[in-house]
Image (cartoon, helix red, strand yellow):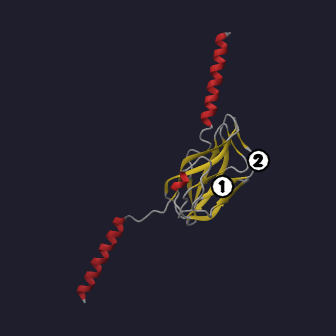
Amino acid sequence: MKAFGSFVGMGLFALAALVGSAGANSITVDFGSPTVTPVGSNFRWDYNISVSANAQVEAGDGFTIYDFAGYTGTFTIPTGWSLVSTNTNAPDYLFETRAATDNSSVTDLILSYSGATTGAALTPTSLGKFSFTSIYDQKVNGFLEGLDHSIAPHLAQSNNFNTQVPTAVPVPAAIWGGLGLLSALFTARVSRRK
């Protein structure tokens, strides 16, 4: 009987550790996201977003995708969510400081939740697909910052999560240099003919 009690105790300890570690990530971008799809001359960026096990979103929670370059103003988000895309220097969430590296000249996508509380103790919960259109399709490493609540104990928590965002692809300096050289040669040749 003593061995059985130890076995049950170890099992409960392992379960508590699993729940605690699963909840540590909070709001995350699912594996394989974002996907980028051409839409006319623009590109739709689809982010599948989840909340970790032992975490939930409730009214007032949300997340920000920082530095989403080339945002066109077109988006599709799940019911219960709202978007603010006019701030290029979004504020930090509780306990977070990564917005300090935010590029103040590039749009931040700030999403806020006003729906019913959603989440589960033992499994991640999908929050849905969040789609935004950019004039760019080139991916660069970026980040998401979020605020949600742990289920047990019920506490506000925030997180940073690496993701990918669109970026303008600059023309390499070597190409500009080459074009400048060609222009100079052309000008010199035209000058000699005169």
Q: Residue visible at 62% across and 33% down?
A: 20
Q: Position of residue 110 (x, y in %)?
A: 63, 57
Asked which secondary structure carries label 2, the reply is loop
Q: Nearer the viewer, residue 50 or 135?
A: 50
Tell me the quarter of the image containing the C terminus.
bottom left
Crowding at dot 1, Cα within 10 Å, few <14 / some 14-19 / many 20+, comes out as some
**Quadrant position of residue 159:** top right
Q: Which mark is residue 116?
A: 2
Q: Is residue 67 above or below residue 158?
A: below
Q: Is residue 125 above or below residue 36?
A: above
Q: Which mark is residue 62?
A: none
Q: Nearer the viewer, residue 76 or 56?
A: 56
Q: Position of residue 51 (x, y in %)?
A: 65, 43
Asked which secondary structure carries label 1, the reply is strand
Mark 2 or mark 1, earlier in chain: 1
Crowding at dot 2, Cα within 10 Å, few <14 / some 14-19 / many 20+, comes out as few
Q: Residue visible at 32% across and 69% down?
A: 177
Q: How many marks?
A: 2
Amino acid type assigned to the residue bearing label 2 in the image: Ala
- The answer to whether residue 176 is left or right of residue 23 is left
**Quadrant position of residue 149:** top right
Which residue is outermost to the right?
Answer: 116
Residue with the mark numbered 1: 111
Q: Nearer the viewer, residue 22 or 180?
A: 22
Examine the rendering and report whether any part of residue 133 can be seen: yes
